[in-house]
Image: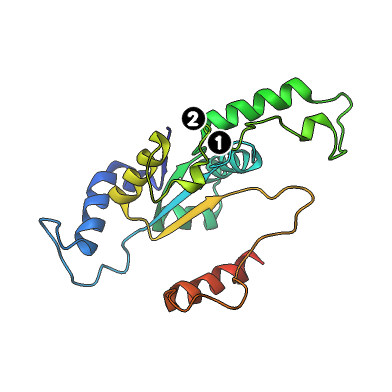
Amino acid sequence: LLILAISSPEKIVDIEKIRDSHISYIDPEHPNYNSNKKPDDFPVIINLAYNVHGNEPSSSEAALLTAYTLVSSQSDEINKYLNESIILLDPTINPDGRDRHTHWVNTYKGSPLVDDPQDAEHNEYWPGGRTNHYWFDLNRDWFYLTQPETKGRVKLINEWRPQILVDGHEMGPQDTFMTGPPREPINKNIDTDLIKWGNVFAQDQG
């Protein structure tokens, strides 16, 4: 599993020190725990992850374009991102499923290309690319942690404790867009901050 750490050159040099300082502000068990307010100029930790379902290939393609944009752009906006954050980019959570799906597409694609949703190119046989090598849907393993890919990903999350975590999926061509906020009725046990920030992100996605 590959993780790209993207930030300004100065922050990349001190990346482990920044990670340790970040944890020291939030983890009471850290030997240098400091509950004082984190400095305003401290970088935000962002985890961008893609392709938990191997047959949602546009997500990992988007990961590569995102990585390329972040490391090559000279725009003020991108430089601001790099100066104010550390971005941990996981281009494919499920490399086995992506390989299986890619093999399927290269085997069945038509020439000229066929956009008929009933065409064999668009209908994988079981188990398809959704699952990993062991035919396990990794998007159902966050709690149980039975698969090596999930264990590695959760280890990264626990080591870094990102403030923003993006899990990039792909909707099919016949599907509508899936954005928040969730439909009513909403579970009353859900944290109100989760609802609040879910609505903020939903507006941005919309």
Quadrant that contains the N terminus: top left
The quadrant holding residue 189 is bottom left
Which residue is at 24% across, 63% downward?
26
Q: Position of residue 199 (x, y in %)?
A: 56, 74
Three-letter code, disc 2: Tyr
Which residue is at 58% across, 41% downward?
53
Which residue is at 49% across, 30% downward?
134
Whether pointer 2 and pointer 1 mark residues with C-beta atoms closer than 8 Å, the reply is yes
Label 2's element?
A: loop
Which residue is at 14% across, 62% downward?
33
Q: Position of residue 129 (x, y in %)?
A: 62, 33
Q: Residues within 10 Å of mark 2 (few under 14, many from 20)?
A: few
Q: Is residue 39 above or below residue 108?
A: below
Which of the two residues, 15 or 94, is positioned nearer the viewer here? 94
**Residue where numbered disc 2 is placed:** 134
**Residue where numbered disc 1 is placed:** 131
**Figure colour scheme:** rainbow
Three-letter code, disc 1: Thr
Q: Is residue 135 above or below residue 80?
A: above
Q: Residues within 10 Å of mark 1 (few under 14, many from 20)?
A: many
Q: Is residue 200 above or below residue 22?
A: below
Q: Which mark is residue 20?
A: none
Q: In the image, 174: left or right of 81?
A: right
Q: Position of residue 58 (x, y in %)?
A: 66, 41
Label 1's element?
A: loop
Q: In the image, 197: left or right of 35?
A: right
Q: Position of residue 123 (x, y in %)?
A: 76, 34
Q: In the image, 51: left or right of 123?
A: left
